[in-house]
Image: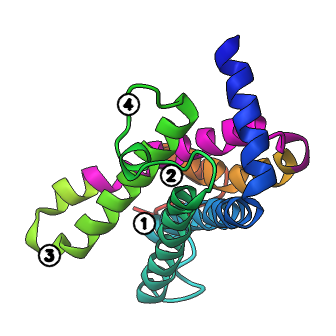
Amino acid sequence: MVDTVHEAVTTLAQQSTDPAARGIAALSARLSYAFMCLSLCWGVLTATGWVRTVTGRRALRSGHLVLATLTLAFGCLHALGFLYLTVNPFSFAYISIPFMPGTLARHTFGIVGLELMLAIAITAGVQRWTSYRRWLWLHRLAYPAVALTALHAFFGAIANGHLATLWLVGITLLVPPVTLTLLRFLPPRTLERIGLVEEQVA
C-alpha cells in the first residue's frame, strides 16, 4: 500500500516537473508501437508472399526493414527519455537490464521486448554469416517480442491513466498483426479453404 502511494506521488511529481521529457517519451512510445504493428504485418506479408503481386519481394523486404528501423529508433528514444527526468530519473542500468531488484513488471516487459527486437535487427545484418535455420529461429522471436511490448504499452497506459483515451487506437493497431500472425501459422489447406491462397493444382 505504501509503495503504491509512493509510486503515485512520484508519478504526479514527474508529470508536473518534466512535461517535455515525459511528452517526448510518450510520443516516441506511441510512434514505436504503431510502427511495430505495421512492421509485423509487413513482415508476415513478406514472408508469405501474399502481396507479392502488388510489388516485388525486394520492395517488400525494404519496406519491412524501414518500418522495423523506425520501431527500434522510437523505442530506444522512449527508453532513453527517462534518463532525462529531473525528478527520480531512471538509471541506464534500470532501462537496459531486465529483472533487476525493484524493476516494475511493466518495465521488464518493455525492456525484454525491445532488446529482443535489437537482437533480431543485429542478426539480420549478419545473416549471410550464419545459417538460415538459426537466423529464422531468432527472427521468429519477434512474435513474443511484440506481445511483450504490447503488454508494456497496455500496463503503462493503465499506470499513467491514459487507458481510457488510448485503448481503442491501441487495439485497432494490434488487431491486424495478431490476425496475420494467426493466419501465418495456419495449415495451407485451411488458407485455401478460406480463399486466402489459391489451391495448388497437381
Horizontally, residue 79 falls left or right of residue 11, namely left
Q: Secondary structure at mark 1?
A: helix
Crowd band around label 2 with a 10 angstrom C-alpha radius: few (<14), some (14–19), many (20+):
some
Residue 4, percent across and down?
A: 70, 20
- In front: 169, or 106? 106
Q: State the residue position of label 1.
A: 47
Which is nearer the eye, 23 or 143?
23
Which SS type dominates the magenta stretch?
helix
The percent coordinates of residue 92 (x first, y second) are 39, 53
The segment highlighted magenta reads: 137-165
Q: Nearer the viewer, mark 3 or mark 2?
A: 3
Write the residue at 68% across / 13% down: 2
Question: Comparing marks 4 and 3, which lies closer to the viewer?
Answer: 4
The structure residue drawn at horizontal position 53% and vertical position 30%, both measured from the top left corner, is 104
Three-letter code for the amino acid on which mark 4 is drawn: Phe
Q: What number is the disc on residue 184?
A: 2
